[in-house]
Image (spheres, helix red, strand yellow):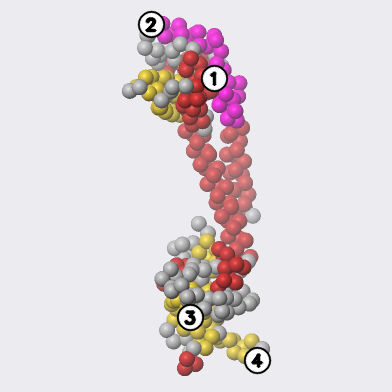
């Protein structure tokens, strides 16, 4: 309960950071006509729609003031410190500055988001490409806008943190659900959890695939179980009027599942046999074979091919993967 409370508290604190929306001024260097105007309009619209920023500014007076600063610099390269000071004057939190250049017959557009309090660049993005028509212009402008309005570097870190918290919570919920359904984490490298009991009926492989789908283990998952789990000595218990034999399989993390022996091979050798979902690609077309997980009384676990997947009826043991 305490763990869940801490996760919820972290989510609330993280979400509260997003609730503090910031004001942004947008400035595209150079003459405010043509491509520059399209880019500026696209940036304004993107910031306004992002949900992170409010009261987006791109006023004539702001641009005019920047223009004064640029009079002595024909290149249009006013310093970020001067831009930040002007941002403070206009009561915004950030200034988005976009620059355009012609490079080798293409347009190169770069943009940066400046924190007016510190004059630090808190996010950047650049694109390049041909710009022969309005569609090209809108496409490049849209790429800049979409990436720049994902937030500052710090906000992007918060996004990642929120995603990690949500994924961790969902993973813990899945684990709890699987435990309630009888699945056991054996500590296998693939993250595969095996159910502790067989399904109630016996099935052909086709029937098992149709009924259980991805819950049926693959041949690789069966091989992993055989390679990484320790097999106990044969054990038994009385069920009604018969004796049932079984093994305990213990995984790398110390957790265990029970697997039953129920089929007789030649010379009275007991065998447990469980369908996988894998059909060998090297089987002849006239043979319906599939891989199964074998448990022999005499030789332990192995994975091998068996014919007549449509006719033989074997137990089914389900799996789930937790990544």
Between the C-alphas of marks 1 and 4, the distance is 83 Å
Which stretch did the figure color magenta?
45-71
Q: Earlier in the sequence, mark 3 or mark 2?
A: 2
Evaluate if marks 3 and 1 touch, with contact meaning CB atoms under 8 Å apart: no
Q: Which of marks 3 and 4 is nearer the N terminus?
A: 4
Q: Residue at x 60, y 43 (%)?
A: 11
Residue where numbered disc 2 is placed? 72
Between the C-alphas of marks 3 and 1, the distance is 69 Å
Q: Residues within 10 Å of mark 1 (few under 14, many from 20)?
A: some
Q: Which residue is drawn at 52% across and 42% down?
A: 161
Residue where numbered disc 3 is placed? 295
| Nearer the camera: disc 1 or disc 4 | 1
Whether residue 160 is situated above or below residue 116 in the rendered picture = below
Label ID, residue 273: none
Q: Earlier in the sequence, mark 2 or mark 1?
A: 1
Between the C-alphas of marks 2 and 4, the distance is 101 Å
Whether residue 265 is situated above or below residue 187 in the rendered picture = below
Q: Earlier in the sequence, mark 3 or mark 1?
A: 1
**Residue 22, percent from left and from top:** 57, 25
Between the C-alphas of marks 3 and 4, the distance is 24 Å
Between the C-alphas of marks 2 and 1, the distance is 26 Å
């Amino acid at each position: 309960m305490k763990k869940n409370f801490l996760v919820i508290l972290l989510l609330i604190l993280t979400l509260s950071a997003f609730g503090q929306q910031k004001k942004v001024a947008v400035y595209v260097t150079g003459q405010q006509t043509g491509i520059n105007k399209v880019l500026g309009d696209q940036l304004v619209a993107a910031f306004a729609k992002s949900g992170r920023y409010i009261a987006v500014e791109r006023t004539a007076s702001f641009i005019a003031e920047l223009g004064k600063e640029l009079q002595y610099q024909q290149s249009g390269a006013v310093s970020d410190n001067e831009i930040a000071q002007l941002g403070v004057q206009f009561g915004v939190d950030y200034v988005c500055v976009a620059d355009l250049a012609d490079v080798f017959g293409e347009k190169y557009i770069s943009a940066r988001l400046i924190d007016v309090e510190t004059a630090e660049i808190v996010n950047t993005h650049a694109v390049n490409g041909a710009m022969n028509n309005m569609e090209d212009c809108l496409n490049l402008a849209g790429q800049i806008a979409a990436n720049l309005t994902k937030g500052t570097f710090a906000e992007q870190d918060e996004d990642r943190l929120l995603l990690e918290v949500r994924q961790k919570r969902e993973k813990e919920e899945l684990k709890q659900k699987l435990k309630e359904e009888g699945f056991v984490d054996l500590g296998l490298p693939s993250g595969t959890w095996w159910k502790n009991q067989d399904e109630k009926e016996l099935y052909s492989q086709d029937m098992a695939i149709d009924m259980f789908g991805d819950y049926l283990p693959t041949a690789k998952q069966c091989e992993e179980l055989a390679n990484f789990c320790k097999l106990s000595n044969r054990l038994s218990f009385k069920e009604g009027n018969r004796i049932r034999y079984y093994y305990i399989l213990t995984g790398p993390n110390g957790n265990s599942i029970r697997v039953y022996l129920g089929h007789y091979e030649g010379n009275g050798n007991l065998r447990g046999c469980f369908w996988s979902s894998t059909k060998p690609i090297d089987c002849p077309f006239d043979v319906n074979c599939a891989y199964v997980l074998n448990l022999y009384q005499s030789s332990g676990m192995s994975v091998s091919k068996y014919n007549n997947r449509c006719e033989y009826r074997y137990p089914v043991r389900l799996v789930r993967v937790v990544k």
